């Protein structure tokens, strides 16, 4: 009897090493240094104050992973690194990479405890009490790292989400928990008659206003501070929730969706951006891993479309449509309030 191919197991045994190679290269600002031009090991080692032999091992690994190019004895950034791994790039994923290294790495180490208890591990790993997301905003640096990490994902996903449905009939979009405003920015760029508003915690809005101003949309996108679970929602005929519902359990999702439905006028809509699980529950892998991530980090999980539909209809929405966006971090769901229902 021949043995099964052990390659899937070997790959998973060493998969964390790939992640740490990326994390370390970003942490040492290797990609930032190489954005100034190709360099050899010795020159780069002097610049970032690293051991040349150890650095060469890391650089060689990054070449094999497709994160760097090597020509002769010189290393240089390919377009992938220039766009996503350099801090100076507007599309940089560095914030989320740093968040993954400094927070998620330690939280995932407690996955066995999370599976046994069914609870996130933030207090176990980092201590402290209180509302979960306050941990992300302990310092201005922490806040910007987390918010800009989410922003980089939004730059990839939001342009596709806002095109998944025809939103031209809506007039005012309020993005709840919208952080940097990447979704209203993308929507306003596609729909010229649309105005937008970002509703988020007050401590986030200084970053929001910087990003909106940088996009040249300060005249069309405003900001409002508050807690979407307790404070009045700004008026809109279209609300959006991007990567919000997966943070919360059933009770808080029901509360939030009911508040949105009540605030909408008749015929209003809710645009949801989440990665939807297949009805089989075993794909796609991105959503499955993200659901485990929600387990160790938050109170929520990723859901199937049938689960979102059940939550939305329980909140009063009369129709639910979904578009699975291939090769996108997020899918799109549009729920509508019956045209005969009055708003709150």
Image (cartoon, rainbow, N blue to C red):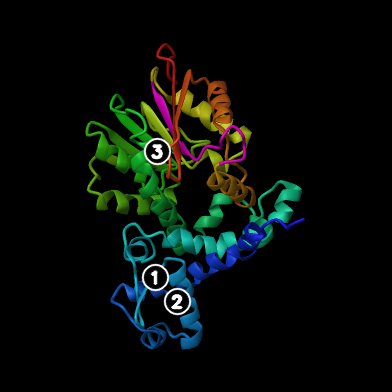
Q: CA distance from mark 3 to mark 1?
A: 37 Å
Q: Look at the image and tell me in which quarter the N terminus lies.
A: bottom right
Q: Residues within 10 Å of mark 3 (few under 14, many from 20)?
A: many
- Residue 311 percent across, percent down from the top left: 57, 27
The residue that appears at 50% across and 57% down in the rendered structure is 137
The segment highlighted magenta reads 268-283
Q: Nearer the viewer, residue 208 or 69?
A: 69
Q: Which residue is mark 2?
A: 59
Q: Helix or strand or loop: what does disc 1 sit on?
A: loop
Q: Residue at x 42, y 51 (%)?
A: 153
User: Is 315 above or below relative to 52?
Assistant: above
Image vertical order of residue 234 relative to residue 12, above or below: above
Q: Are marks 3 and 1 in contact (CB under 8 Å)?
A: no
Query: Residue 282: where, in percent of width, then height?
Result: 61, 40
The answer to whether mark 2 and mark 3 are in CB contact below 8 A is no
Residue 163 x %, y %: 33, 35
The residue indicated by pointer 3 is: 175
**Label 2 crowd bin: few (<14), some (14–19), many (20+), radius 10 Å:** many
Mark 2 → mark 3, Cα distance in angstroms: 41 Å
Q: Are marks 2 and 1 in contact (CB under 8 Å)?
A: yes
Earlier in the chain: of badge 3 and badge 1, it is 1
Mark with earlier residue (2, 3):
2
> In which quadrant of the rendered image does the C terminus lie?
top left
Q: Secondary structure at mark 3?
A: strand
Q: Is residue 252 above or below residue 247?
A: above
């Amino acid at each position: 009897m021949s043995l099964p191919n052990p390659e899937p197991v070997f790959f998973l045994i060493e998969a964390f090493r790939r992640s740490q190679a990326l994390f370390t290269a970003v942490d040492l600002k290797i990609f930032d240094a190489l954005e100034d031009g190709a360099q050899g090991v010795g020159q780069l080692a002097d610049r970032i104050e690293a051991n040349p032999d150890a650095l060469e091992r890391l650089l060689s690994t990054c070449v094999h992973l497709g994160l760097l190019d090597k020509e002769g004895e010189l290393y240089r950034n390919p377009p992938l690194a220039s766009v996503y791994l350099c801090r100076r790039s507007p599309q940089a994923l560095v914030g989320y990479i740093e968040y993954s290294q400094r927070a998620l790495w330690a939280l995932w180490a407690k996955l066995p405890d999370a599976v046994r208890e069914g609870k996130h591990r933030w207090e176990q790993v980092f201590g402290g009490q209180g509302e979960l997301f306050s941990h992300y905003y302990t310092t201005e640096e922490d806040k910007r790292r987390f918010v800009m990490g989410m922003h980089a994902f939004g730059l990839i996903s939001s342009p596709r989400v806002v095109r998944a449905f025809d939103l031209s009939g809506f007039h005012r979009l309020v993005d709840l928990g919208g952080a940097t405003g990447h979704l209203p920015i993308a929507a306003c760029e596609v729909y010229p008659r649309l105005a937008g508003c970002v509703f988020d915690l007050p401590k986030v809005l200084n970053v929001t206003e910087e990003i909106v101003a940088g996009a040249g949309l300060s005249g069309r996108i405003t900001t409002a501070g508050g807690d979407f679970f307790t404070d009045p929602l700004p008026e809109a005929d279209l609300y959006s929730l991007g990567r919000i519902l997966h943070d919360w359990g059933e009770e808080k999702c029901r509360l939030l969706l009911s508040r949105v439905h009540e605030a909408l006028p008749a015929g209003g809509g809710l645009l949801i951006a989440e990665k939807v699980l297949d009805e089989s529950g075993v794909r796609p892998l991105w959503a499955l891993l993200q659901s485990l991530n929600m387990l160790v980090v938050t109170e929520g999980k990723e859901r199937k479309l049938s689960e979102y539909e059940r939550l939305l209809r329980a909140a009063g929405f009369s129709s639910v449509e979904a578009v699975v966006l291939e090769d996108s971090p997020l899918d799109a769901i549009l729920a509508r309030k019956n045209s005969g229902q009055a708003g709150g």
